[in-house]
Amino acid sequence: MHDMDIGRVVLAKAGRDKGRHFVIVGKIDDNYVLIANGKTRSIDKPKKKKIKHLEAKPHVVYNVREKILSGKKVFDAELRKSLEALGYER
């Protein structure tokens, strides 16, 4: 499994999101992914981010990953709860 796969928890290392945790909700190409956290970035308006500006964390939010891959709707609350449950947001 690739480090920057859908569902992976990442830390933004650059830009106005620096220091915040996100979940990868889409992959554009080898350089860009779409990230959201349900708070500052909603799942409906994810942020396009360069992979080199992200640090992969060891966790993958599998319930969100499965939903995205199967085309089901993911809610912001799910992203927030998942990040909180893993200890990334308080």
Image (cartoon, grey):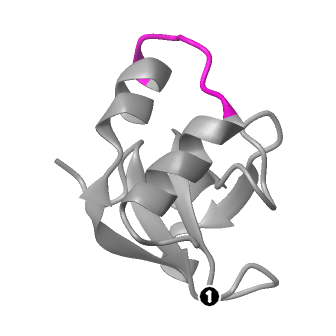
Residue located at (77% from left, 85% from top): 15
Q: Give the left or right position of residue 84, taking residue 18 as reference.
A: left
Q: Nearer the viewer, residue 41 or 32?
A: 41
Residue located at (62% from left, 88% from top): 19
Is 72 drawn above or below residue 58 in the view shown? above
> Tag 1's secondary structure?
loop
Which residue does the numbered mark 1 point to in the structure image?
19
Q: Classify 10 Å Cα crowding around label 1: few (below 14), some (14-19), many (20 and above).
A: few
Q: Position of residue 58 (x, y in %)?
A: 24, 68
Q: Is residue 60 visible?
A: yes
Residue located at (76% from left, 56% from top): 39
Q: Position of residue 34 (x, y in %)?
A: 63, 49
Q: Give the left or right position of residue 14, taking residue 51 as reference.
A: right
Q: Position of residue 32 (x, y in %)?
A: 58, 57
Q: What span is in magenta?
A: 69-75
Q: Answer with the quarter of the image where residue 49 lies.
A: bottom right
Q: What residue occupies the far top of the structure in this picture?
A: 71
Q: Position of residue 14 (x, y in %)?
A: 67, 88
Dividing the image into 4 quarters, which one contains the C terminus? bottom right
Is 20 drawn above or below residue 22 in the view shown? below
Q: Is residue 27 visible?
A: no
Q: Amino acid at mark 1?
A: Gly
Residue located at (82% from left, 83% from top): 16
Q: Nearer the viewer, residue 43 or 78?
A: 78
Report the number of discs. 1
Q: Give the left or right position of residue 69, taking residue 46 as reference.
A: left
Q: Which SS type dominates the magenta stretch?
A: loop
Q: Answer with the quarter of the image where residue 87 lies.
A: bottom left
Residue 55 lies in the magenta-colored region: no
